[in-house]
Image (tube, rainbow, N blue to C red):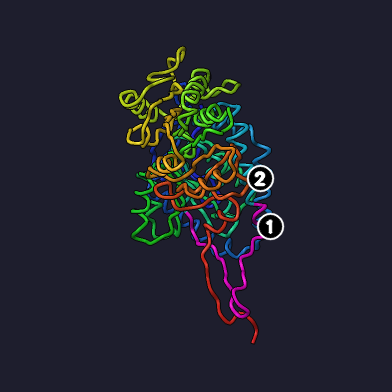
Amino acid sequence: MLEKRNFYINGAWVAPAAANDFAVIDPSTEEQCAIISLGDQSDTDAAVNAARAAFDSWSQTSKEERTALIQKLAEIYDARQEEMAQAMSMEMGAPILLSRQQQVGAGSWHIGGFLNAFKDFSFERDFTATEKTLLEPIGVCALITPWNWPMNQIILKVIPALATGNTVVLKPSEIAPLSGLLFAEFIDEAGFPAGVFNLVNGDGPGVGSQLSSHPEVDMVSFTGSTRAGIAISKAAADTLKRVSLELGGKGANIIFEDADPSAAKQGAIRCFRNSGQSCNAPTRMLVHKSRYDEAVASASEVATNTRVGPASEEGKQIGPVVSEAQYNKIQGLIEKGMAEARLTAGGLGRPDGLNRGYYVKPTVFADVDNTMTIAREEVFGPVLSIIPFETEEEAIAIANDTPYGLTNYVQTADVEKRRRVARRLRSGMVETNGQGFAQGSPFGGYKQSGNGREGGVFGLEEFLEVKAVSGWAAE
């Protein structure tokens, strides 16, 4: 078990103000793997005050100074990848191969994307011959991150906030805090000035709410559930701080009759990746009736053949879901689905041979329609719903009939259809024919999937105020 680590405030590791221990559970074993302290109001105040005191000097540093520190951080991150992979695997259950390649790799990818975008980024832009538009840091930013892709989300927030001259207070998920604490070590090793980056552990009702309502916090950037995003927005309203939200999803994967033969198989694999714990997972598979039976059989075969096992084992298995609460929620939704639709793979309980750990059977439901709970609620587990359609119009209507709008998927060999459908889907991202997004592409959603954009130049601009200055040119 890891030793308890303190908070990182004003460039130093400091003990929490009060003893408020919280056990971190390894979801593969249900055993305690670490103990952290949850902060209280005085810890939150100390971190925010440190960030406020550091803001004036940090915001006036040059772009070159900030770039050099981020490049140093990137070197440390790459040199200590295995430590980070082990931490994430233990805290949230990502199989170690997935943790090394994708959980850690996402962090390297986004740091590189921000550094590339920052090279040509200008904080001063000509508006007219005599007027200049200035982009300036917002101030103290509270960054509240989830447990499902820990480094992906921490880096998508911390790097652009620091690059653009803001100071930050990070609250990682209390369920998976070890990677955030390790990241704070990297920040310290890189030599960022005291107070520029601060970390306080805590839960949502505690430190999360304190940061959201804090009068000295200028912005909150949050990734997590839509329910929590609404609560944060309400808490922030009294101080009119900026709130950037990356929330849930219920992505539709539209498979037309001319789609690649492997489209259903690949869609199921993508749905089950990270044990289904991705907000952009394609959890609703919409299939043209001419391909429907084939798709159900293919997805069900993927589910049956997907190996489930401990995160510490090498291989391409999926691991447990993150917690007992998450496991119970998923089991409840599977039970609901069994009463609504046709179960073709998986179902209730743990996979055979796994009697301990929060393991969920990869599950497929067929003959689903969009009125069913299983089609409307974000399960956040390895559960796929398959819905038939007959026409392009019907597919678009089903895909858009959701409160979410994060990522949708389109599979067709017809280029014009692909473009036409992508334009009409109400989501912040549309992935077509398995083509991934480029480095620095804007990540974010419509509707109840949030209102922010992360990654590259879009992520940098998220942390900036816009100032118009007239009479800039010499008279």
* Residue at the disc numbered 1: 119
Quick check: 207 left or right of 282?
left
Above-or-below relation of 201 to 262: below
Residue 289 location, quadrant: top left
Residue beneath the point at 48% across and 58% down: 140
Q: Crowding at label 1, few (<14), some or many (≥20) Cα neighbours within 10 Å? A: few
Decide: is 92 above or below 61.
above
Q: Position of residue 444 (x, y in %)?
A: 49, 48
Locate residue 343: give its quadrant.
top left
Q: Earlier in the sequence, mark 1 or mark 2?
A: 2
Considering every residue shown, the one lying at the far bottom of the view is: 475
Kind of residue sitting beneath label 1: Lys
Whether residue 189 is visible here, answered yes or no, is yes
Residue 74, numbered label: 2
Mark 2, secondary structure of its residue: helix
The residue positioned 39% from the left and 56% from the top of the image is 214
Q: Is residue 62 above or below residue 414?
A: below
Q: CA distance from mark 1 to mark 2?
A: 15 Å
Tell which of 170 and 376 is nearer to you: 376
Amino acid at the residue labelled 2: Ala
For image coordinates 33% across by 33% down, the residue present is: 373
Element type at mark 1: helix
Q: Position of residue 416 (x, y in %)?
A: 57, 46
Q: Position of residue 250 (x, y in %)?
A: 43, 39
Q: Position of residue 77 (x, y in %)?
A: 64, 41
Range shown magenta: 115-141
Quadrant for the C terminus, please.
bottom right
